[in-house]
Image (cartoon, grey):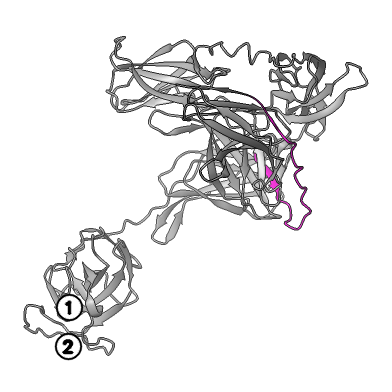
Amino acid sequence: MMMKKLSAAALAFVMSMSTFAFAAYADEKEEQEGSFAAVYSDTKLSADFVYNTGTAPDAPTVVSAIKRSDGMELKWNAVSGANGYLIRAVHPSGESMGMYYSYVTGGNTTSFFWDYMWNVNKDWDFFISSYSDGNYGQKNLSATASKFTVTEAQTSTTPDKVEFTGYSKSTKYIELDWKSQNCDGYEVSFKAANSADYVVLGVTTETHAKISQLQPGTTYNVRIRAYRNNGANKIYGAYSEEKTLTTDSVTDNNAVPGDINFNKVVATEDSLRYYWDPASNCDGYQIYFNETGNSTDWKFIANVNSSTLDYRFTGLDNESNYWISVRAYRYNASGTPVYGNWTNKQGTTEKKGKTSEIETNSTTPPAAVSFKKVVAGEDSLRYYWDPVSNCDGYQIYFNETGNSTDWKFVANVNNSTLDYKFTNLDSESNYWISVRAYKYDKSGNPLYGSWTNKQGTTEKKGKTTENVTAPAAVSINTRNATVSYDTISVSWSPVDCDGYEMWINETGYEWKQVATVSSSTTSYRFNKLKPNHQYWFTLCAFNKLANGDILRGSFSTNYTATTLSSSSPQPVAVKPAKTEFTSFSRTSNAIRLNWTAVNCDGYHIYRYNYNTKAWERVAVVNGGNVTTKRFANLNAETTYVFKIRAFKYGTNGTSKVYGEYSSPKYVTTKKK
């Protein structure tokens, strides 16, 4: 930016040829021949040595000029093809009485604050033109200039005193609500009751604040004041009445979690998978296993989190009995586990070549879909349904007339999708959706459940149904968190919602949203953290509104953890065991592979490329309990070769430790 003054003595009008306009010369030494200075009447250009080597841009259109106590705030619309702008302040009696000008570089620049350090009187007139860069350092100036209409800045008045409307609290936080004010924001301050001085926590534009990381059973004082912006300064209202609140005391709650109820056992010739229903009031489950039936032969297997509702044992003998015993546990306020009752379940492996339930149910279609709600806008409908067990996805059709011949295919979606939104609909009109679940059998063919129809009616213009409620608060399973030097993983118990927002705080007062995950997700890994640094985490569930907005539930109680020092000894992930393919199914264009589960975080599957004579990774399967994968869009009567290996994550959450490769599996697709 360059700012100069043209003296009255320097003004001289010189008639020139077509390449030159009227000229004015500055009497300052740095203004060399061919440099750029401009003088304007109200809208006409009078420029000195503007060598038009290219096309000049149009003059910009002005937006506003607000006169403030310390300067003029100018705004305009950007001009296509401009490289910058020339702004002039002209004495109200004319250029001969004085003029200042300033260059503003950047064609996308749309504002400039001109302070009064150059003694520009704030009653002067202000003009703006645009320019493009020409040859030899010259500039192509717009043929006209635009004049700003100057308005006085409104003097900010003092906002009213803040009034509290409600609060909530726990052992670790205080939440406050207050009446909305006609202001630009609110300043929140607090102190412990035994402290002399208040501390400013920060500012917010909301009428709600949550103060976290407090001590249980401790009294705190909170006060809030509203403010209005006045240029670069703020005008504050009076402080609210001091709100005195005491966080809840920690109590030693020894409530016992509920009992385990097993709901099924899936057996193969060498494995057993036990399933159970979720227990009430628990943080996780403790699992023991018995291979003999003797009371002295129980072996501890694992403690798993409350979202884990099955466990698989492999490498077993065929046609043999085995027993599992599971009990729920929770942690009391002192961190001591409180256990529920043991529940035992026997399982029997199958004969060689036979599989229970997986085989017998392979020809059983999934259950029908059950709709749970419809959210309507004036031009949209979003349909929600409950998950169907034992399905691979859902097929969706739509009908705009209600006639049985007018159903139109919309999409096939995966089994984690439990809602679908239709847009650009007519207001106050009826529409119908039809959804059915499907799964693939052993041969890769789809098996469909029954159709379920649901009518929806769009609203009047300007109205949206208000039957969407905020989901319940989420509870972080703090005992299942894992920490490394640059990652922290958290998990939580699921709630009925459309998704979750993940938030992190690395300063103690500034929260940042880092991710949005689906409603089927119950864990999240925060990556790229600083070693030996304390972080705070929270999340909330949300539901979607018809207009695309979200309705949040209450945030979880904050969880805090400190990453390990980068120099701390890091436990090395144990190399997972070797897995092998157990069976496969095939069609003319698809292959489904099955393999044995091992203790790992997932599997990499590779396929041999006959052209490059190399193995290529074709799939990453997350989850050690997932033991099947389908490959589609294959060629008929073609032999494909696969191999697989298991992996575990290292403690940094990104590096992997691999098991050995399996033996190659050769599969030839069928004829068409």
Expressed as whole percent of the image width and height from the top left, the position of residue 432 reads 35, 15
Q: Amino acid at mark 1?
A: Val
Left or right of residue 183, residue 519 in this image: right
Residue 314 disc label = none
Would you say the residues marked 1 and 2 are in contact, meaning their CB atoms lie under 8 Å apart? Answer: no
Expressed as whole percent of the image width and height from the top left, the position of residue 136 reads 24, 80
Any part of residue 57 in sight: yes
Q: Determine the secondary structure under disc 1.
A: loop
Left or right of residue 270, residue 49 in this image: left
The residue that mark 2 highlights is: 9
Residue at 63% of width from left, 14% of height from top?
Answer: 359
Q: Which residues are magenta?
A: 556-583
Rounded to the nearest whole Å, what is the CA distance between mark 1 and mark 2?
Answer: 21 Å
Q: Determine the secondary structure under disc 2.
A: helix
- For mark 1, does the 10 Å Cα neighbourhood hold few (<14), some (14 to 19), or many (20 or more) residues? many
> Could you say which is closer to the camera, residue 442 or residue 134?
442
In the rendered view, would you say 424 is above or below 428?
A: below
Q: Amino acid at mark 2?
A: Ala
Corner quadrant of residue 525: top right
In which quadrant of the rendered image does the N terminus lie? bottom left
Q: Main secondary structure of the magenta part?
A: loop
The residue that mark 1 highlights is: 50
Left or right of residue 48, residue 512 in this image: right
Quick one: label 1 or label 2, which is nearer the N terminus? 2
In which quadrant of the rendered image does the C terminus lie? top left
Expressed as whole percent of the image width and height from the top left, the position of residue 457 reads 34, 17
Is label 1 or label 2 in front?
1
> Could you say which is closer to the camera, residue 8 or residue 439?
439
Any part of residue 554 in sight: no
